[in-house]
Amino acid sequence: MDVDQFDKHLLRLLQQNNRLTADELAQEVGLSASAVQRRLKRLREDKIIEADVSIIAPAVAGIAITCIVDVILEQGNSKALDKFKATMLAQPEVQQCYFVTGNYDFILLVNTRTMQEYEAFVKKWLMDNSNVKHFYTHVVMDRVKVSHSLTL
């Protein structure tokens, strides 16, 4: 998992545009195209680059409602936590799920097409879940900043 300055430079460039060719990357970082290809292969094999994806606009998928949901569980034992994690992993509406410290056990980012879909999600997976003690919903009014880039 060692990354040098060349790797970091490549990663910074790829976080902005992962469609750059090896030749374009090589020119930017000062390496040969074959050296860039070897580095990219290693970065992917070592899971430093976790995925090559295209990020689409939510509206294209019909997503009109984004909610941030704070969840407090009734029981915090490992079995209950693992069960809740598995349940959230299986829900397509849950874009992100974080097990956190502080006042809440989990924070969810949930995307739906309508408020009625969100209500159905809440009823099925939170209200009817005997291990969910409380949950609080924050409806997103504006996506001020959404970034998937990490500072290197």
Image: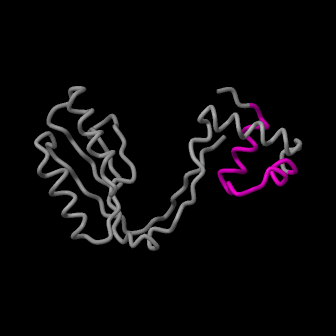
- Residue 3: image x %, image y %? 71, 31
Within the magenta stretch, is there residue 78?
no
Residue 26 lies in the magenta-colored region? yes
Viewport quadrant of the C terminus? top right
Residue found at x 29% / y 46%? 88
Report the number of numbered marks: 0
Q: Residue at x 65, y 51 (%)?
A: 15
The main secondary structure of the magenta stretch is: helix
Is residue 109 positioned above or below 133 on the image? below
Q: Residue at position x 51%, y 59% from top?
A: 146
Report which quarter residue 100 is drawn in.
Answer: top left
- x, y (%) of residue 129? 14, 46
Considering the image in quadrants, where does the N terminus appear?
Answer: top right
Q: Is residue 55 left or right of residue 101?
A: right
> Which range is magenta?
4-27
Colour mapping? one colour
Q: Is residue 75 left or right of residue 64?
A: left
Q: Is residue 138 above or below residue 77?
A: below
Q: Is residue 140 left or right of residue 15?
A: left
Q: Residue at x 24, y 64 (%)?
A: 118
The x, y position of residue 60, in whole percent, is 46, 73
Percent of width and height locating residue 138 = 29, 59
Q: Is residue 99 left or right of residue 147?
A: left
Location of residue 110 (image quadrant): bottom left
